[in-house]
Amino acid sequence: MEVINFVLANTSTFLFVLIRTGAILFVAPIFGAVNVPMQVKLGLTLLIALIITPLTPFVPMPENILSMAVSLLGEVLIGVLIGLAIKFVIAGIEFAGQIASFQMGIGMATAYDPINSAQVTVLGRMMSILSLLIFLSINGHLMVLMALQKSFEVIPPYGFHLSAGLMDGFVNFSKEIFILAVKFSAPVVAILVFINVAFGIMARTVPQINMFVIGYAVTILVGFVMILISMPVFETSVITVFEDMWQGVFNLIKVM
């Protein structure tokens, strides 16, 4: 009953907290996955909003519908930008698996990704699962909630504004998809380039050997061996990427 009375007395504050919380949770990894039931998302959004509302300074309700719509749109943009910034990093690692798959010649082997509701290559799906497991192992889900709470400290309701720094920061996050994809797929791509050069030389010197048949099997085998060798470094690299990501997210919040 006390909670209900508090919410009724602070309806405007609770509304803005609820909108921003929902926007982040519906977009961020883990929380916003397609296979997470809608009831769970809504219940978690409501619970977190009830917890954060007492920690947020009271804000009055906008004077008219237009002001209210603009203010709520700002809250949605805050949540979506933070959620997408986190999601871009995992998407980059998944994209690295897809690049490696096509380089190895197994790009046609796809699997359904229930998190993003899309078809991805098998290696891309594997990279996505590994990155999400590492994300959970370093309490990334709690860091999402910390970023949410930090956003209310830095950006009060009605406080969102578009700026050149915000656009630059968001563009930097979006280009990380391609940078991370190249970095994490580099070991496989590099070794397979040398393998293909070697096969090209052998095809010219010993034309009797069918390099297409041999090369296909060797390329897949070498690719998987290289992935296996790079796995110990993969975890450390992903953790480092996530640590840098949180610093970038907090910087993004400051320029909002």
Image (cartoon, rainbow, N blue to C red):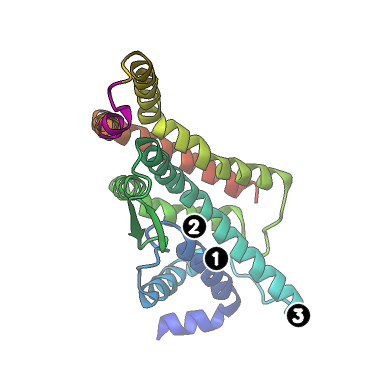
**Location of residue 214 (image quadrant):** top left
Name the residue beneath numbered marker 2.
Answer: 148
Q: Answer above or below: position of 40 versus 116.
A: below
Secondary structure, mark 1, is helix
Q: Is residue 148 left or right of residue 58?
A: left
Total count of labels: 3
Question: Which residue position is annotated with label 1?
Answer: 20
Image x and y of residue 154, in percent = 59, 52
Check disc 2: other Cα within 10 Å, few if <14, some if 14-19, many if 20+.
many
- The foreground one among 208 and 254 is 208
Q: Left or right of 132: which side holds 65?
A: right
Mark 1 Cα-neighbour bin, 10 Å: few <14, some 14–19, many ≥20: many
Question: Does residue 26 appear left or right of residue 203 in this picture?
Answer: right
User: Callout 2, which amino acid?
Assistant: Leu
- Residue 212 located within the stretch drawn in magenta: yes
| Image point (40%, 86%), residue name | 1
Q: State the CA–CA distance, disc 3 to disc 1.
A: 20 Å
* Segment colored magenta: 208-217
**Camera-nearest residue between 193 and 231:** 193
Residue 233 image offset from top left, x and y in percent: 30, 29
Choose between 66 and 155: the one closer to the eye.
66
Query: What type of secondary structure mainly makes up the magenta span?
Result: helix
